[in-house]
Image (cartoon, helix red, strand yellow):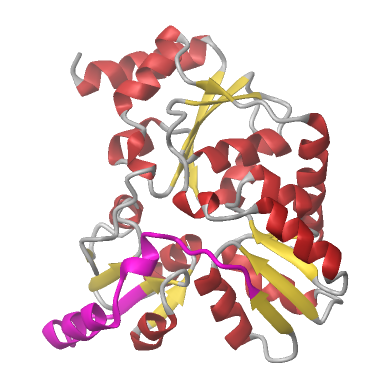
Amino acid sequence: MKDKNMIDEIIKIKEEKDIKILAHNYQNYEIQQIADHVGDYLQLIEAAKNIDCKTIISCGVKSLGETLKIVSDKNVIIPVSEAICPMNKKINIEELISFKNMHPQFTIVSSLNSQVNLKAISDICVPTSKAVEIIERLDSENILFAPDMNLGNYISKTIKNKNVMSWTGHCTIHDKVTKEEMINVKQKHPDRPIIVHVQCKEDVIKLADYAGSTSQIIEYVKNLKDNKVIIGTETGILHVLRRLNPDKKFDLLSPTLICMNMKKTSLEDVHRCITEGKGEVIEIDENVKLKALNSIDNMMKHL
């Protein structure tokens, strides 16, 4: 079946079955085309809480589907079970629980894009776009941030009046970008601003013209006078940037900025999910869900 036929059928059937499709900014162009909402975790949480539907098809990695299930009373399905963020695999939950028990003076802060089990043992979650702002407001002076040590390091360097420690882990995609690549690109295109994600290494961020989350990058680029921009985050965001800024030219900073787990969900997968019921229905233990929801609720109070 051709892509257009699949798209037409998906749009028709999702209306008949009361389904909404929520897609992360890093998804393939075809997925973004059929989505009812495209955004980062925080934006998709707001969409999941407010949209009127029976079922949500979550297009992203599994932790996104889990997060939408935590905040929503709707059925949540992910088309591909194997779409799992590698960073979440690096966290040993038992070791983190042990740290928490041994160091009660630390507030455990986790990224909003973390797995449900990490959210459940966290005191609060933070979206990347609001991480610094929220942590600055916390009463605790001692913070343990997980799971991204690059983002944790960025937070630590930005907030001067708190002791921010980072758990070992990183985004395997953003962490691949090197200082040497930055230098080479700056020498090749000295007239172009370079915008990178805050999950990149510190020496990469220092050479960038701006560093932010996906939503911050999108907003920042909108206001740029430059019409040629180099982007240092996952390639999927280029679809969003080009749609919102048709007069600007965007190039990817590094060929390594492709998350194969985000790309595991294809148009065919979504089509099978809608027409044949394929995919994984997200189910979370009620006790774990309530604990994870508490960390998200604490986040919402600080927004």
- The quadrant where residue 241 appears: bottom left
Residue 46 percent coordinates (x, y): 65, 45
Is residue 263 shown above or below 122? above
As drawn, the residue found furthest toward the left would be 188
Left or right for 103, reference 241: right
Q: Does residue 50 appear in the picture of this structure?
A: no
Does the image show residue 155?
yes
Report the residue at 85% width, 63% height from top.
101
Q: Residue 194 colored magenta?
A: yes
| Residue at 36% over, 33% down | 265
Q: Quadrant of residue 184?
A: bottom left
Q: Considering only vertical position in the picture, is 42 above or below 189?
A: above
Q: Relative to residue 166, is residue 219 drawn left or right? A: left
Q: Quadrant of the N terminus?
A: top left
The answer to whether 198 is drawn above or below residue 94 in the figure is: below
Residue plotted at (47% across, 47% down): 85
Left or right placement of residue 154 versus residue 245 in this view: right
Instruction: In this rendered view, identify the residue nearer to me: 28 or 288.
Output: 288
Residue 178 horizontal/vertical position (percent): 29, 76
Quadrant location, the C terminus? bottom right
Give the quarter of the image for residue 225.
Answer: bottom left
Instruction: Give the residue drawn at x 43%, y 37%.
Output: 83
Read off the magenta span.
166-195
Magenta run includes residue 159: no
100 or 290, nearer to the observer: 100
How far across and how far down the image is residue 200, in percent? 41, 72
- Please provide percent x and percent y for residue 245: 30, 60
Indicate left or right for 234 with 13 as reference: left
